[in-house]
């Protein structure tokens, strides 16, 4: 028998289990407690903190607590979305770790009765010069491409960052977005006693056992031996499962749907009963198995993929079975909903485990974070690079800035024929079929900022994601997050978590964007290093009429280019200081949420009133990189003439927040100025769109003088060269 310590439980937790049961647990019960009380399933370190988030709003249909969050977009439609992590599995088996991450997040969406229409991925890897990083990078990208392409859900957006803090512990965060009829939403709450419990989809094997516990511990040299904890995915079965579950969800006899993800049957069964304040009884001998002589322990803890739990009205079992048989999938009744508030597990009619439902779900011992305030942020007298054109070329080639084209070209981002704006822009845009609506989707987090100041960095992650949507013409309507940190038992990491959560809460509240779903991933460290705090923000925006869609590329020669927003470029830490100057310290840019909010209003008005032709957010690499990206996207050039009291390098590459560059016809300038005055937003005309030159002049001195062909070649091809070196 496993000892409770081997399963990741503490002595205090074991004592509480005995009190809940009024006896010693048997091996199966101990395994069930260990997965349900793991950090991955219970959020025992962060549950209290997450209550700080704003989770309600006029569009919110379903907030945190379900498989995914739901936001109303009008006309009887809702958008359903969620982000999850698959970090530890991807560290030991990158292909399957990433692939099954995609499979799991997609199941969260169609479990709600929504058709998945888009995938996004936020990825972090170590030093790209390291051979293991290249192995992990290749495996993760291949796993995402394989699974997403096979199930026919386009991967349309995301981000990739490289830093040696992720050498041992890559981050693989995946997000899925779906569309459903508001009247057809399904929840995972089993309230009707006597209902039948059906296990549908694939057979159950031994893969993934204790995967939830594995995801709740530090990575060590022994982690490689835990490959059996990484599930094996079958995207072709998942594609069938999507269609079968969506067909079944349209039937009123289906009362609840729950994905079998982390902790398998243990989690799915206990969650549907707990949410419904009922009990559940299952018979393991009825579970379709693909391996011989599986024990009750293995069956109840297996994390085999492509499986769902359906709770259906008594007498309707055959109706549902026929749907799944049509798609060549199992649909086996394995139990029923009871009124005793117990989770009873039987094997061949004999009880092998019996636990009070709330003991598994609601009575998890909460861990009080012991936080010790500390500062990474500090004042730095930054040196200055003399050749700023060379610095510009180096930033264009920087792996954290250059185009991700060699990655997203491996993804099928057009399948489903909904993608209007493809990967590579501020946000991707998907049309909503049979309507004039569209949604914009993005992910964002600058973990370097969060390392220097977790509060300010987390605020910026929210604001940057919102800005990415606003410049497309979309109103941000909802947030999902994936909070990635190292060991929360370290008081300094606990402080990072507290400050980052507060930063997200303050920014979301100020910008009035509710947080409707999310995930927490802790223990992302090895004996050698801890990851930077990485609170990734996924965000969805609504474009009520996609004729108001705005793109980022410059369009016409002779158009004016205008800088909207804050002009202050006082030296602060940024990609230029980190990568070019080699300084891994400093203070991140500060974010004024009131100015950010005014910028959003002004930008949306300018787009909806057809005053501007393009809009692009300024982020990593500063103004010079943003101008280059707009030129590349529009296949046009620019002559930019700046007058500034700021150091020339920070005028070019500083990452001051709350700034957007727009282009417009000269005759529209007075209309832009009027809106800027009304919204109290600073503006500065900075240049003109030309055919192919790329010239930046500062205080009458030509600093950068090149052409679009040159910068496009560097920007488009650098990542592929780095990966293949």
Image (cartoon, rainbow, N blue to C red):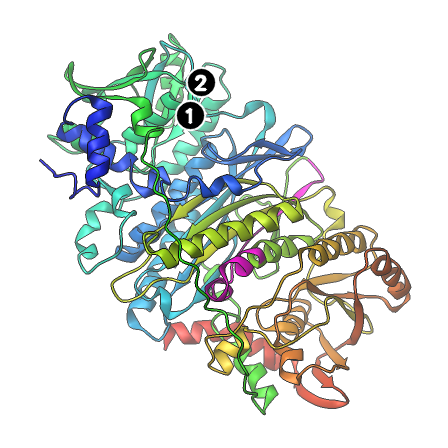
- Residue 153 visible in rendering: yes
Please tell me how many numbered marks the rendered image carries.
2
Which residue corresponds to mark 2?
A: 254
The residue at which mark 1 appears reads as: 257
SS of the residue at dot 1? strand
Q: Which residues are magenta?
A: 435-459
User: Is disc 2 placed on a helix, strand or loop?
Assistant: strand
The front one of 417 and 264 is 264
Q: Can you tell which quarter of the image residue 515 is in? A: top right
Q: Farthest residue in the left direction? A: 1
Above or below, 29 against 166 in this view is: above
Q: Residue at x 63, y 44 (%)?
A: 513
Image quadrant where residue 24 sits:
top left
**Of the pair 413 and 518, the residue shown nearer to us:** 518
Q: The N terminus appears in which quarter of the rendering?
A: top left
Q: Residue at x 57, y 37 (%)?
A: 55
Residue 330 in view in this figure:
no
Check the image and report above or below for 128 versus 430: below
Where is residue 142 drawn, in percent x and y? 37, 57
Whole-percent x, y for residue 154 in the image: 50, 48
Label 1 CA crowd tier, 10 Å (few <14, some 14–19, many 20+): many
Name the residue: 75% across, 56% down.
Answer: 603
Find the distance from the CA under tag 1 to the CA under tag 2: 8 Å
Q: Is residue 202 left or right of residue 251?
A: left
- Residue 337 coordinates in the image, percent (x, y): 34, 14
- Specify whether residue 396 is painted magenta: no
């Amino acid at each position: 028998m496993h000892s409770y310590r081997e399963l990741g439980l503490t002595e205090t937790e074991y004592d509480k289990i005995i009190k809940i049961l009024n006896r010693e647990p048997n091996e199966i019960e101990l395994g069930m407690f260990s997965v349900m009380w793991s950090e991955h399933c219970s959020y025992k370190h962060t549950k209290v903190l997450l209550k700080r988030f704003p989770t309600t709003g006029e569009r919110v249909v379903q907030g945190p607590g379900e498989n995914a969050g739901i936001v109303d977009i009008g006309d009887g439609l809702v958008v359903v979305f969620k982000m999850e992590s698959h970090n530890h599995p991807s560290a030991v088996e990158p292909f399957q770790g990433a692939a099954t991450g995609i499979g799991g997040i997609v199941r969260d969406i169609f479990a709600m009765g929504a058709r998945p229409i888009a995938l996004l991925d936020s990825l972090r890897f170590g030093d790209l010069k390291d051979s293991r990083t290249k192995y992990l990078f290749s495996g993760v990208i291949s796993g995402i491409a394989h699974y997403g392409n096979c199930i026919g859900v386009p991967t349309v957006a995301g981000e990739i960052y490289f830093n040696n803090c992720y050498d041992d512990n890559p981050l693989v965060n995946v997000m899925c977005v779906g569309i459903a009829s508001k009247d057809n939403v399904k929840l995972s709450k089993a309230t009707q006693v006597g209902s039948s419990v059906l296990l549908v989809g694939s057979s159950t094997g031994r893969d993934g056992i204790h995967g939830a516990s594995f995801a709740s511990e530090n990575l060590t040299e022994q982690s490689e031996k835990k490959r059996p904890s990484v599930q094996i995915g079958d995207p072709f079965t998942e594609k069938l499962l999507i269609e079968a579950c969506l067909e079944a969800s349209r039937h009123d006899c289906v009362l609840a749907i729950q994905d079998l993800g982390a902790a398998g049957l243990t989690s799915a069964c206990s969650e549907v009963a707990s949410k419904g304040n009922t009990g559940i009884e299952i018979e393991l001998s009825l579970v379709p198995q693909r391996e011989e002589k599986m024990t009750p322990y293995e069956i109840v803890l297996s994390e085999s993929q492509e499986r769902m739990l359906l709770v259906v009205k008594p007498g309707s079992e055959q109706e549902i079975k026929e749907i799944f048989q049509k798609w060549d999938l199992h649909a086996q009744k394995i139990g029923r909903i009871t009124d005793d508030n117990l989770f009873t597990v039987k094997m061949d009619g004999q009880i092998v485990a019996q636990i009070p439902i709330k003991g598994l779900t609601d009575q998890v011992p909460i861990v009080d974070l012991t936080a010790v305030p500390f500062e990474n942020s500090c004042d730095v007298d930054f040196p200055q690079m003399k050749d700023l054109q060379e610095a510009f070329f180096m930033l264009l080639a920087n792996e954290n800035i250059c185009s991700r084209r060699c990655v997203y070209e491996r993804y099928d981002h057009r399948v489903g024929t909904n993608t209007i704006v493809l990967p590579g822009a501020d946000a991707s845009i998907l049309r909503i079929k049979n309507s004039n609506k569209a949604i914009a989707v993005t992910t964002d987090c600058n973990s370097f900022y969060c390392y220097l100041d977790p509060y300010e960095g987390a605020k910026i992650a929210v604001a940057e994601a919102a800005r990415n949507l606003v410049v497309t013409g979309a109103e941000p309507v909802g947030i999902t997050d994936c909070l990635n940190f190292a060991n929360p038992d370290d008081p300094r990491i606990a402080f990072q978590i507290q400050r980052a959560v507060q930063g997200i809460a303050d920014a979301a509240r100020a910008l009035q964007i509710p947080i409707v779903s999310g995930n927490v991933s802790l223990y992302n460290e090895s004996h050698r290093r801890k990851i930077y705090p990485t609170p990734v923000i996924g965000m969805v925006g609504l474009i009520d009429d996609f004729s108001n869609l705005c793109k980022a590329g410059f369009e016409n020669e002779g158009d004016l280019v205008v800088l909207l927003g804050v002009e202050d470029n006082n030296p602060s830490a940024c990609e230029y200081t980190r990568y070019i100057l080699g300084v891994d310290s400093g203070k991140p840019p500060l974010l004024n949420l009131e100015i950010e909010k005014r910028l959003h209003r002004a930008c949306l008005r300018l787009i909806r009133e057809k005053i501007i032709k393009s809009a692009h957010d300024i982020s990593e690499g500063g103004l010079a990189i943003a101008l280059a990206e707009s030129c590349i996207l529009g296949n046009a050039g620019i002559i930019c003439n700046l007058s500034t009291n700021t150091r020339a390098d920070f005028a070019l590459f500083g990452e001051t927040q709350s700034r957007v560059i727009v282009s417009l016809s000269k005759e529209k300038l007075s209309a832009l100025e009027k809106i800027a005055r009304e919204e109290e937003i600073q503006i500065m005309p900075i240049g003109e769109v030309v055919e192919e030159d790329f010239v930046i002049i500062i205080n009458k001195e030509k600093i950068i003088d090149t052409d679009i062909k040159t910068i496009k070649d560097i920007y488009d091809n650098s990542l592929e060269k780095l990966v293949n070196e």
